[in-house]
Amino acid sequence: MVLKAAVIGVGNMGKHHARLYSQLPGSKLVAVSDVNEDVGKEMALQFSCKYYKDYKEMLAKERIDVVSIVVPTKLHKDVAMACMNAKKHVLVEKPIADNVADAKEMIESAKKNKVKLAVGHIERFNPAVQKLKELVDEGKLGKITSLMAKRVGLFPPQIKDANVVIDLATHDIDVFSYILGKEPTRIYASAGHALINKREDYAEIFLGYNGTNGMIQVNWITPVKIRNLSVTGTKGYAELNYITQELTLYESKYERKFGDFGDFVVKFGEPTKIDVAIKKGEPLKLELESFLRAVHEDKEPLVNGDVGLRTLEIALKAIEKSKEQT
């Protein structure tokens, strides 16, 4: 069965949702909605579907199975609730909402209306992240002692209502939880605004996972775009580039022995470097395929509302902690 799809908000990110729904064999793009008529009509013409300025009119007039919601975060709840009350399965871009109460209301609405609610934490579908998760689960890195993520670059002008923690750090917060299979028990952060008034544009976040430490650096200040993740374990070290989908593994070689004066020492040899083979793919395409599959098979999405809520709670706690430092 081909699912009829619609996209609400076809700007910078939403246009790619529309493109993929029009291409994927499991879906057919039937309509798009955007308050900007020029943009909306252009997308409708490009992908041979209908355009609506008012998404509620679209929901009333069109036969739709699934909807991607790609609007400013503060509008997520209202738009998602309207779609779910109309019995549509929903994928809402991350973060799920801008506050916990709205996120919980959205989750309850999905349950009440018996529809799927997925949250667009796209990095989970990055093939390099999937492979790293596989290596960690197989014990290739041993016990994980630390994760360090760097996600920096210039300010994106399309971001109107989120700070750098909500917009960027939520990616790595979710990836850390995914890789480790658990949530942090300790959260510390320092953040501030250097170039943008009233919104944090840089932050460092420390997450503790009972024996494993996570560090996230995010900003909208660095003049080059960097999206890296490194993971250290007792058996090795891995470096991942989110953008190029490259993953390098360094297998540790060491021996424990006693030195000349009876001191216990660990001697390291040259590590074995492995460029891990990755079947590269477009993360958003893999995300939408996963969402469509969840609807087809009546299964929970990989990143459901509960996952989105937990990531939001951690990000908001980090913002709270950073304000305690000022």
Image: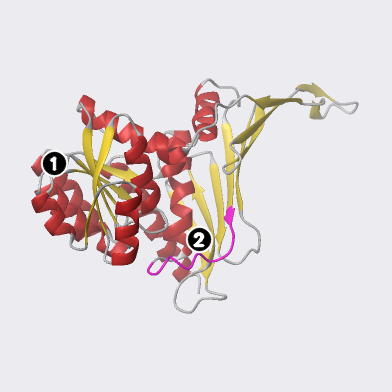
Image check: 184 left or right of 86? right
**Which of the two residues, 297 or 274, is positioned nearer the viewer here?**
297
Q: Magenta residues?
A: 151-161
Which residue is more in the foreground, 122 or 188? 122
Q: Provide residue 266's location: percent of width, then percent of height.
A: 78, 28
Q: Farthest residue toward the right?
A: 260
Q: Which mark is residue 282?
A: none
Q: Which residue is mark 2?
A: 189
Q: Residue 177: x percent and y percent? A: 43, 40
Question: Residue at (40%, 53%) from the top-left corner?
Answer: 13
Give the total of numbered labels: 2
Q: Main secondary structure of the magenta part?
A: loop
Above or below 216: residue 147 = above
The image quadrant where one finds the N terminus is: top left
Residue 250 against residue 202 in the figure, above or below: above
Locate residue 152, reporting x and y percent.
59, 57
Q: Residues within 10 Å of mark 1 (few under 14, many from 20)?
A: few
Q: Secondary structure at mark 1?
A: helix
In the rendered image, the vertical position of residue 176 relative to residue 26, given as above or below: below
Q: Give percent across and percent down for residue 120.
A: 36, 46
Residue 77 falls in image quadrant: bottom left
Question: What's the residue type where badge 2 is placed?
Answer: Ala
Q: Secondary structure at mark 2?
A: strand
Alpha carbons under labels 1 and 2: distance apart: 34 Å
Instruction: Tell me if mark 2 has few (under 14), some (14-19) or many (20+) residues whose alpha carbon lies within 10 angstroms of its own.
Output: many
Q: Residue 111: which numbered mark, if any?
A: 1
Labels 1, 2: front one: 1
Q: Is residue 36 visible?
A: no
